[in-house]
Image (cartoon, grey):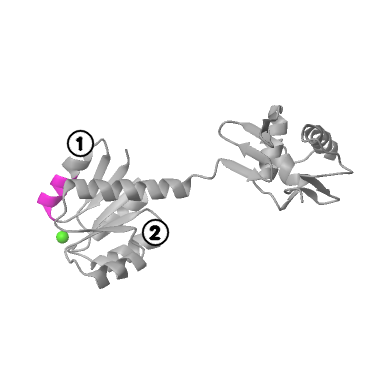
């Protein structure tokens, strides 16, 4: 299910597409000129735009360019010309996919589904991260070390996850306070105490670190052990 904007000046084609998309539970808005489409995109923030290239007010590639200037929304262009050069040019100009008219409802749905899948994957941040033998699953809120589950408190998990998803980078203490403790200031000891608990659970110590490395005066870095 998605919010789809259909941009098509041919009333017959437009109605058919709206009917088809609505019957598959999509929410559909429509526009019949490029300028209406621009307004719709900035006001209604659709998930995907199907853009007819033969609009009365603007040349198709101009319309695409203007759309791209205001939004990253996925755009499927509908062209009457089965012309490879033209299609390549449009894809380079920011179209995500294309349909050659006349297209079947099945073809439209297949393109729409593929484009939505791609854009949702791109939008979703990774939920699982693996650093050496350490595996952190954000969604399941589970962490494992060398295949064995770690029994962590909520705060320990948040701390470990924050560091693991930034593995290899020194995370400043103030960032940890802000992101893990939701505090704008605080005591370094709070972090140190949780770090030492976490170290114990990871089977390491501050003097013999494996994953958790304190960079004095700066922050903490999580790395895969050598
Ligand atoms: Ca047209």
| Picture quadrant of residue 133 | top right
Residue in view at x 40 percent, y 50 percent:
118
Q: Is residue 71 left or right of residue 208?
A: left
**For mark 1, what is the residue?**
23
Exactly how many numbered labels are in the figure?
Answer: 2
- Most distant residue in the left direction: 12
Counting residues from the start of the chain, the first of labels 2 and 1 encountered is 1
Rendered view: 40 above or below 90 = above
Task: List x then y, in percent, for residue 151.
Answer: 71, 27
Query: Which range of residues does the magenta coloring cover?
Result: 10-17
Q: Secondary structure at mark 2?
A: helix
| Closer to the camera in the image, 30 or 137 | 137
Residue in view at x 18 percent, y 46 percent:
105
| Closer to the camera in the image, 5 or 31 | 5
Q: Is residue 12 magenta?
A: yes
Q: Quadrant of ligand 1?
A: bottom left
Q: Is residue 153 magenta?
A: no
Quick one: label 2, few (<14), some, or many (20+) residues within 10 Å? few
* Separation of residues labelled 2 and 1 (CA atoms): 29 Å
- Most distant residue in the front direction: 147
Instruction: Pick the quarter of the image with the N terminus.
Output: top left
Q: Is residue 204 left or right of residue 139?
A: right
**Within 8 Å of ligand 1, the CB of disc 1?**
no
| Picture quadrant of residue 208 | top right
**For mark 2, what is the residue?**
70
Q: Secondary structure at mark 1?
A: helix
Rendered view: 203 above or below 102 = above
Q: Is residue 180 visible?
A: no
Confirm or deny contact between disc 2 and disc 1 (CB under 8 A): no
């Amino acid at each position: 299910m998605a919010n789809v904007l259909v941009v098509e000046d041919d009333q017959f084609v437009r109605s058919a597409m709206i009917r088809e998309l609505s019957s598959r539970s999509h929410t559909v808005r429509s526009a019949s000129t490029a300028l209406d489409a621009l307004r719709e995109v900035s006001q209604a923030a659709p998930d995907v735009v199907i853009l007819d290239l033969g609009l009365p007010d603007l040349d198709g590639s101009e319309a695409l360019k203007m759309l791209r200037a205001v939004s990253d929304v996925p755009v499927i262009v509908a062209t009457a010309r089965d012309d490879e050069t033209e299609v390549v040019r449009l894809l380079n100009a920011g179209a995500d996919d294309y349909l050659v008219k006349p297209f079947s409802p099945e073809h439209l749905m297949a393109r729409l589904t593929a484009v939505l899948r791609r854009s949702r994957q791109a939008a979703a941040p990774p939920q699982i991260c693996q650093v050496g033998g350490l595996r952190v699953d954000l969604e399941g809120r589970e962490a494992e070390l060398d295949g064995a589950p770690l029994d962590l408190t909520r705060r320990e998990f948040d701390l470990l996850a924050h560091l693991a998803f930034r593995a290899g980078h020194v995370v400043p203490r103030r960032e940890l306070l802000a992101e893990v403790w939701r505090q704008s200031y605080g005591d370094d000891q709070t972090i140190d105490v949780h770090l030492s608990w976490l170290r114990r659970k990871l089977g390491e110590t501050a003097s013999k670190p494996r994953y958790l490395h304190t960079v004095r005066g700066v922050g903490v870095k999580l790395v895969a052990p050598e």
